[in-house]
Amino acid sequence: MKKLFLFVLSLSLITACSNDDDVSTPEADPIVGTWVVVGATLFDPANCENESTIIFTPDNDANGTFYFEQAGCEAETSTGSWENIGNSSYTVSVPVLGQLQGTADFTSEDRFVFTTGAYGSFTFERQ
């Protein structure tokens, strides 16, 4: 009888444990990460030796370092924010560029084109 009691107790403990595999975690926004500007409508990023980059953090901060030939290829660093407003549309606010609203077309997990009316388009690759 004692063995039966221990068996039933063990069985109930095993089946009472929850499985964490069923818990879903929210998927990170595809824009989160460090991105290098590899193309732009208004400037050629290849004209400066250093790479222009922007970091989109999970907490909606945006940190950018840009090199523009018109500014002597000197670093212009700024912080701002970003927001996914749905349907591949984003609002990005970085003091160097101002507040931009546009569409992000992710051609792969490591590349996207951000198209905005104010500055044309920017092509980014994941760093």
Image: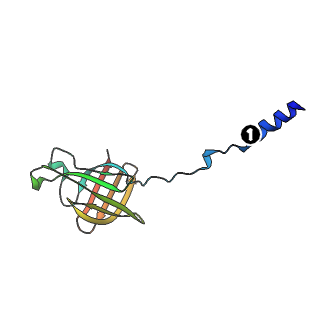
> Residue at coordinates 39% horizontally, 52% vertically from top-left?
58
Q: Amino acid at mark 1?
A: Leu
Q: Position of residue 115 (x, y in %)?
A: 30, 63
Give the percent coordinates (x, y) of residue 47.
14, 49
Quadrant containing the N terminus is: top right
Q: Residue at x 29, y 55 (%)?
A: 123
Residue 113 position by quadrant: bottom left
Question: Dot 1 surroundings within 10 Å: few (below 14), some, or many (20 or more)?
Answer: few
Q: Residue furthest bottom?
A: 117
Q: Residue at x 26, y 65 (%)?
A: 99
Quadrant showing the C terminus? top left
Single out the residue that lies furthest toward the top: 3
Note whether 58 is above or below 90 in the view shown: above
Report which residue position mark 1 lands on. 13
Q: Quadrant of residue 97?
A: bottom left
Q: In terms of depth relative to the viewer, which is nearer, 57 or 8?
A: 8
Would residue 68 be found to the left or right of residue 58 on screen?
left
> Circle 1 — which element?
helix
Image height check: is 21 above or below 94? Answer: above
**Residue 64 position in % (x across, y down):** 25, 52
Q: Nearer the viewer, residue 7 or 51?
A: 7
Answer with left or right where residue 18 lies relative to residue 4.
left
Of 86 and 6, the residue lying toward us: 6
Q: Is residue 100 above or below residue 127?
A: below
Check the image and name the residue furthest to the right: 1
Residue 80 appears at what percent x and percent y? 27, 58
Seen in the image, is 116 located left or right of residue 6?
A: left
Residue at coordinates 16% horizontally, 44% vertically from top-left?
Answer: 49
- The foreground one among 5 and 53 is 5
Classify residue 15 as left or right of residue 90.
right
